[in-house]
Image (tube, rainbow, N blue to C red):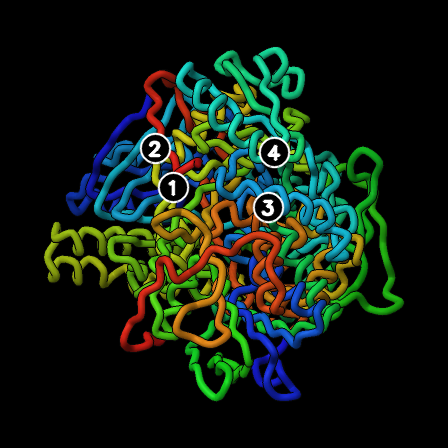
């Protein structure tokens, strides 16, 4: 692990990236491959925040329609992720089902998924027997399902380790367990003050997930980033019960069985807590999350939950990503609030890196200026 | 069915600390609910015998202390909720518990935790074989069910439980092939001055040693288990001499015993997960067994209204736990305004001196079970460290080599601590492996305590429900 004082032994780094999640690491990877001297700084370990503790579902059909082109590109990134990083992130393109239980949900499923098909995502509609052919444990509550063969999952716990290894191999300096205490602009670059010393860089990328607002405020810019407290649960190991990932048209279900047999239950049900502290359950949400899951898969009922946990997911009021140049500053960028960020992050990071390298990104970015406001005084951490 | 109960104080854990906390608080006029996982209060040391156990007289002084506690609880106004597992604690305080026949939600302005300990077992090849059991697990079988863990056993590890378990095996008609103690006779003798305050316990210990002598049981000091072997379960145990640090002596004379059980334990670790799940501040104090809550002298934690007593707050032994429980119970009554300062001071006074004496004894015992770095270093690469997830030492060392510096990283990278025990068993070993790399426990951290505190069946958590009545929160934008 590098210390700040030897992060850029030859002077100023080309770019400092605050936040070593999947966004920051994806940007770092591309920039390092292009020959830039990159330093990644994280308050914890690389990949230890939301990127490491999300449910790991890589479902394309549950993503927002407006993000479809990004999700489809991201699936290509994921397919080559283990090879590119030189470490197994347990990517499985298992295919996935999105379920409807009621008549109204079925109508919405057809509307929403037809729109996604028109946007280029391969989708087919299945009645219950056809859905059961893929997922035999489905209950009678299922009226209809959409199937996407590109859906899958990977293991978020391993992603940070894999990126860390790949970035190290490409000469990226990584400073972990060292929160940024202050950032100052000036002299054609930025100075980041850490506990272990200062880091200087010509460019700055803020990729700190739900922590991004605090980082940006240090530069006198406010982004109205809130945090959702997403609840996840996992069972003990179970015999084979599931083949792929399961969602529900409401977006409130994420179910899959991992390679080791545990079943991971998510779906964006909310806990409570403040960014930086372990999240806490909201009892009704915990109970109803499980109830909703057993409506789809009754065989879950006897399995034991061994752990619940929470990830902080940043968002802005329009629930669209914030990816691009930070206004009022020179060569400062932000990448945050990518809903479904674990899935789409590798694509977004690549696009932002292209833009930093002066290339025209293959898809448009999401201009932070639409939500940014200037604050008079930079707010220290 | 979910029973809703409110009280002045909820006590979790009905062992010496929790039981006496409940009695003291109830005696001072509080409405107390005592929740325990077992079929009856008593905890581990004062465990209630199962229904099949008829000859209670043979069970000894711990049994009598347990019977006295159970009788006192029955005679008191304490509401005992036996057979209930608390799985989620919420600030303020709400305790969610589950039983075989339903769930309970308890609310109280004060919560007292008396969770006891988890046994530490330093891994060696074969420690996950069937027939290898912790000393505490063996004690539970012997006390609760009067069941012998094996017909011919080796008892190994460190601390005062060794002779206690070996003696119980002999009394139950089993054979003890050897007692294998990391400690040396001089180490035991160093504890004697502190033990003089408890002549009853010294006498009991000497009685056990005499029994071992009469049965001709070899007592091997400065020895440790090198490996356990067997096809379907443990069939033999090989032990070898170690130095004072627990390192195997080069060229030491290994001895092999044919057995059908190996009972092994290297000390007790405070079960701090419940208190940590509420965010109480903790300190790492090796002499007390590991991570312990930051408390004032009367069991008050860093969170107002949260009290912690007994070995779960630092291992000092059952006698000290009972007294600390009483102290904390009185403190709750005082803090809730049920007894005034004068009465509180008067009732605490006689407890303070006794708890100090009892704790001295407990500390002397704790010194015997200190983690010996040589024994940690001797764990071979292929040995399983996390038995829930089958993570070997080699995998853990590889993660350290790659730069993992916090327990959370170790867990994510190797899956250690992700199984049903949630790191209660492997956590202390991993911490000791980190220490060997010079990583301080404070920087490494304990595993984050996350609910449920015990594995909970999904069906128990959902209960019976009407799918049509299930209300969903609003969805996020889809277009």
Task: Identify the secondary structure beneath mark 2.
Answer: loop
Residue B190 in sight here: no
User: Mark 2 belongs to which subunit?
Assistant: B
Residues at discs 3 and 1 in contact (Cβ within 8 Å): no
Q: Position of residue A99 (x, y in %)?
A: 51, 23
Q: Are marks 2 and 4 on the same chain?
A: no
Residue B418 is tagged as 3
- Which mark is nearer the camera, 3 or 4? 4
Residue A189 in sight here: yes
Residue that badge 1 annotates: A270
Residue farthest along the right direction in this orientation? B251
- The structure residue drawn at horizontal position 44% and vertical position 66%, both measured from the top left corner, is B283
User: Mark 3 belongs to which subunit?
Assistant: B
Quadrant of the frame with the C terminus of chain A: bottom left
Q: Position of residue B1 (x, y in %)?
A: 33, 21
Residue B282 sits above or below residue A179 on the image? above
Residue that badge 4 annotates: A121
In front of the other: B36 or A41: A41
Q: Are marks 3 and 2 on the same chain?
A: yes
């Amino acid at each position: 692990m590098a210390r700040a004082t030897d992060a850029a032994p030859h002077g100023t780094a080309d770019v400092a990236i605050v936040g070593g999640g999947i966004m920051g690491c994806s940007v770092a990877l591309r920039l390092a491959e292009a020959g830039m001297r990159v330093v990644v700084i994280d308050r914890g370990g690389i990949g230890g925040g939301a990127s490491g503790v999300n449910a790991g579902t890589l479902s394309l059909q549950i993503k927002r329609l407006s993000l479809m082109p990004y999700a489809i590109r991201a699936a290509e990134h994921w397919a080559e992720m283990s090879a590119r990083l030189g470490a197994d992130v347990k990517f499985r393109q298992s295919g996935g089902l999105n379920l409807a239980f009621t008549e109204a949900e079925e109508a919405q499923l057809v509307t929403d998924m037809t729109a996604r098909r028109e946007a280029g995502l391969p989708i087919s509609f299945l009645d219950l027997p056809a859905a059961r052919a893929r997922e035999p444990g489905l209950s009678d509550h299922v009226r209809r399902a959409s199937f996407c063969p590109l859906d899958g999952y990977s293991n978020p716990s391993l992603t940070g380790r894999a990126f860390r290894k790949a970035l190290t191999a490409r000469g990226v300096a990584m400073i972990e367990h060292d929160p940024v205490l202050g950032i100052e602009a000036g002299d054609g670059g930025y100075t980041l003050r850490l506990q272990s010393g200062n880091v200087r860089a010509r460019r700055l990328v803020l990729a700190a997930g739900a922590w991004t607002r605090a980082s940006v405020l240090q530069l006198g810019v406010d982004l109205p980033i809130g945090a959702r407290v997403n609840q996840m649960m996992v069972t003990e190991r179970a015999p084979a019960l599931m083949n792929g990932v399961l969602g529900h048209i409401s977006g409130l279900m994420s179910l899959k069985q991992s390679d080791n047999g545990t079943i991971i239950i998510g779906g964006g049900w909310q806990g409570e807590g403040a960014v930086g502290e372990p999240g806490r359950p909201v009892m009704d949400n915990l109970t109803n999350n499980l109830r909703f899951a057993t409506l789809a898969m009754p065989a879950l009922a006897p399995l034991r939950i061994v752990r619940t946990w929470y990830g902080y997911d940043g968002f802005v009021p329009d629930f669209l990503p914030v990816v691009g140049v930070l206004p009022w500053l020179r060569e400062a960028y932000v990448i945050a609030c990518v809903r479904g960020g674990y899935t789409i992050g590798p694509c977004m990071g690549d696009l932002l890196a292209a833009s930093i390298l002066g290339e025209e990104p293959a898809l448009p970015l999401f201009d932070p200026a639409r939500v940014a406001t200037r604050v008079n005084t930079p707010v220290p951490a | 069915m979910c029973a809703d109960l409110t009280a002045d104080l909820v006590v979790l854990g009905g062992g010496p600390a929790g039981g006496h906390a409940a009695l003291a608080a109830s005696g001072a006029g509080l409405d107390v609910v005592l929740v325990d996982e077992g079929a009856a209060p008593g905890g581990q040391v004062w465990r209630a015998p199962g229904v099949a156990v008829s000859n209670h007289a043979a069970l000894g002084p711990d049994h009598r202390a347990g019977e006295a506690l159970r009788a006192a609880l029955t005679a008191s106004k304490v509401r005992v909720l036996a057979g209930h597992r608390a799985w989620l604690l919420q600030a303020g305080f709400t305790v969610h518990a589950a039983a075989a026949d339903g769930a309970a939600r308890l609310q109280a302005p004060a919560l007292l935790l008396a969770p006891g300990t988890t046994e530490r077992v330093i891994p060696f090849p074969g420690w996950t074989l069937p027939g290898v059991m912790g000393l505490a697990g063996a004690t539970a079988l012997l006390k609760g069910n009067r069941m012998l863990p094996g017909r011919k056993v080796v008892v190994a590890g460190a601390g005062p439980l060794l002779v206690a378990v070996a003696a119980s095996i002999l009394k139950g008609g089993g054979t003890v092939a050897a007692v294998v103690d990391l400690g040396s006779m001089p180490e035991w003798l160093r504890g004697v001055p502190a033990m003089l305050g408890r002549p009853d316990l010294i006498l009991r210990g000497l009685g056990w040693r005499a029994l071992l002598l009469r049965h001709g049981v070899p007592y091997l000091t400065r020895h440790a288990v090198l490996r356990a072997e067997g096809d379907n379960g443990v069939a033999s145990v090989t032990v070898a001499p170690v130095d004072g640090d627990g390192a195997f002596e080069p060229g030491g004379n290994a001895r092999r015993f044919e057995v059908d059980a190996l009972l092994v334990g290297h000390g007790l670790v405070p079960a701090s997960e419940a208190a940590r799940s509420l965010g109480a501040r903790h300190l790492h104090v090796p002499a007390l067994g590991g991570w312990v809550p930051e408390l004032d002298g009367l069991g008050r934690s860093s969170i107002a209204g949260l009290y912690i007593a007994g070995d779960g707050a630092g291992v000092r032994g059952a006698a000290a736990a009972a007294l600390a429980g009483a102290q904390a119970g009185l403190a709750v009554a005082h803090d809730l305004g049920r007894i005034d300062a004068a009465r509180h001071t008067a009732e605490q006074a006689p407890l303070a001196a006794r708890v100090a004496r009892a704790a001295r004894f407990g500390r002397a015992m704790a010194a015997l079970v200190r983690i010996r770095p040589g024994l940690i270093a001797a764990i071979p690469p292929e040995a399983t460290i996390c038995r829930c997830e089958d993570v070997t030492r080699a995998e853990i060392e590889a993660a350290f080599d790659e730069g993992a510096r916090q327990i959370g990283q170790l867990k994510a990278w190797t899956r250690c601590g992700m199984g049903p025990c949630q790191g209660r068993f492997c956590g202390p070993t991993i911490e000791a492996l980190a220490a060997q790399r010079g990583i301080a426990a404070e920087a490494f951290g304990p595993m984050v305590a996350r609910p449920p505190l015990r594995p909970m069946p999904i069906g128990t958590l959902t209960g019976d429900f009407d799918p049509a009545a299930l209300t969903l929160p609003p969805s996020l934008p889809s277009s």
